[in-house]
Image (cartoon, rainbow, N blue to C red):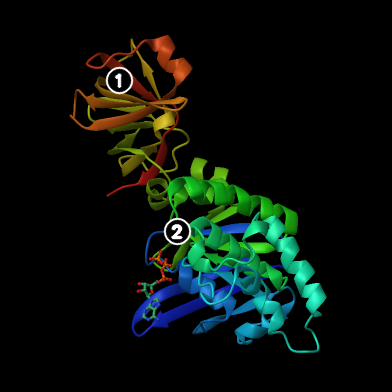
């Protein structure tokens, strides 16, 4: 089911939690709402679920307008950060719950419910745990049960609010992979809230980046990471080096460096900020002083196949962060304390002040 959100606004007293949100989600997409705490992610999810009313704006599910439709009639599965399982019910009964409380007309038979729950138990790999109670499960297992419970009623839309927020890093990673697999198998339109960039980049087909009640950027993980459209997105999605200066003759004047700027649309003499990701900086031994930045290697550390290098600029004493592949690093034979030159491969310019 596709979703269309038009001009949705929400205030709590005088506080604007959502400002003119416009968003279209296609059937079968797995979309992440990503943003810092308080940016409005949960409020938007709750409005889509019908747990909260927007002040203004319209929401469509497919062709139908549902802005004020009761939550129970929206056919939405909702998974919260804190499992919210029924403590006094077994895993089996928790998953079956949504089916057992359906009105008699639409309720499947006891046998059908049993077969459906068993299939879901297989899917979440907890067949052997059907008779356990939530207190006898780990956090990851509880969250899998919560997902199975949400899926049991065959929702047209699956909403997940920080579903793995309370779990440790390894279990989170496992569940992410599993959520993606589940999504691919079921093809349910899904929206999940997270403030973890890595999680959003790893799981989602599309990421909606929110800040202070507004959407900053919408795009595929590659798009938002490689082509951030604002300093906010640059900073929020991973590490970045920022060069502040003045743009003149196609160059950013920063410290002693004159860094070439691609297709400048800024007027000459504008104050500007140049953004470069650590992997977009290269290290060379011999540089022309102008187009490269002289710096001393302060620290080197390896994370898997990547090598992170921290350098201190000779001109401004600021620190730079460079990421090389292990091969690049081994070719260069770099050592702590050595003087080198750092060159941006790609500089994204934003207006500064
Ligand atoms: N019922 C409410 N009454 C008053 N203010 C609220 C209410 N619900 C949310 N807010 C405020 O609206 C803003 C957005 O909240 P929301 O929960 O949507 O943010 P979020 O991006 O999901 O943050 P987090 O990641 O911390 O959950 C916050 O400043 C919050 O305090």
Work out whether residue 158 or residue 106 is closer to the camera in this orientation and state it: 106
Q: Tell me what residue is drawn at x 22 percent, y 30 percent.
A: 255
**Above or below, comparing residue 277 to residue 171 in the picture:** above
Q: Secondary structure at mark 1?
A: loop
Q: Tell me what residue is drawn at x 29 percent, y 13 percent.
A: 335
Tell me if mark 2 has few (under 14), some (14-19) or many (20+) residues whose alpha carbon lies within 10 angstroms of its own: some
| Residue that sits furthest to the bottom in the current view | 104
Ligand 1 location (quadrant):
bottom left
**Above or below, comparing residue 167 to residue 278 in the picture:** below
Tell me if mark 1 has few (under 14), some (14-19) or many (20+) residues whose alpha carbon lies within 10 angstroms of its own: some
Q: Is residue 172 left or right of residue 30?
A: left
Q: Is residue 60 left or right of residue 170?
A: right
Q: Position of residue 330 (x, y in %)?
A: 42, 12
**Above or below, comparing residue 270 to residue 164 in the picture:** above
Looking at the image, tell me whether mark 2 or mark 1 is earlier in sequence order.
2
In the rendered image, which quarter is residue 130 located in? bottom right
User: CB under 8 Å between callouts 2 and 1?
Assistant: no
On the image, numbered disc 1 is attached to which residue?
A: 290
On the image, numbered disc 2 is attached to which residue?
A: 165
In the rendered image, which quarter is residue 3 located in? bottom right
Q: Position of residue 76 (x, y in %)?
A: 65, 74
């Amino acid at each position: 089911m596709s979703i269309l959100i038009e001009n949705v606004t929400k205030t709590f007293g005088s506080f604007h939690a959502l400002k003119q949100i416009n968003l279209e989600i296609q059937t079968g997409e797995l979309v992440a709402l990503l943003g810092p705490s308080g940016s409005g992610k949960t409020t938007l999810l709750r409005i889509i679920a019908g747990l909260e009313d927007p002040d203004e704006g319209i929401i469509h599910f497919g062709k139908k307008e549902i802005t004020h439709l009761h939550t129970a009639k929206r056919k939405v599965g909702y998974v919260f950060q804190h499992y919210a399982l029924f403590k006094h019910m077994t895993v089996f009964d928790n998953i079956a719950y949504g089916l057992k409380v359906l009105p008699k007309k639409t309720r499947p038979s006891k046998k059908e419910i049993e077969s459906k729950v068993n299939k879901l138990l297989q899917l979440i790999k907890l067949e052997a745990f059907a008779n356990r109670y939530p207190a006898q499960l780990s956090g990851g297992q509880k969250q899998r049960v919560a997902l199975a419970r949400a899926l049991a009623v065959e929702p047209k839309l699956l909403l997940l609010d920080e579903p793995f927020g309370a779990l440790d890093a390894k279990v989170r990673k496992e569940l992410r992979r599993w959520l993606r697999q589940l999504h691919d198998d079921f093809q349910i339109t899904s929206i999940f809230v997270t403030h973890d960039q890595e999680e959003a980049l790893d799981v989602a087909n599309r990421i909606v980046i929110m800040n202070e009640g507004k959407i900053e950027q919408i795009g595929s993980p590659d798009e938002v990471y490689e082509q951030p459209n604002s300093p906010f997105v640059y900073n929020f999605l991973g590490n970045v080096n920022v060069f502040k200066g003045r743009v003149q003759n196609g160059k950013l004047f920063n410290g002693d460096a004159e860094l070439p700027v691609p297709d400048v649309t800024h007027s000459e003499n504008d104050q500007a900020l140049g953004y470069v990701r650590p992997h977009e900086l290269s290290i060379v031994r011999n540089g022309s002083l102008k187009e490269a930045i002289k710096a001393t290697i302060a620290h080197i550390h390896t994370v898997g196949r990547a090598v992170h290098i921290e350098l201190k600029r000779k001109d401004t004493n600021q620190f730079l962060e460079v990421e090389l592949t292990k091969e690049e690093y081994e070719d260069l034979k770099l050592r702590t304390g050595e003087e080198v030159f750092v060159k941006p491969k790609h500089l994204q310019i934003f207006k500064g002040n």
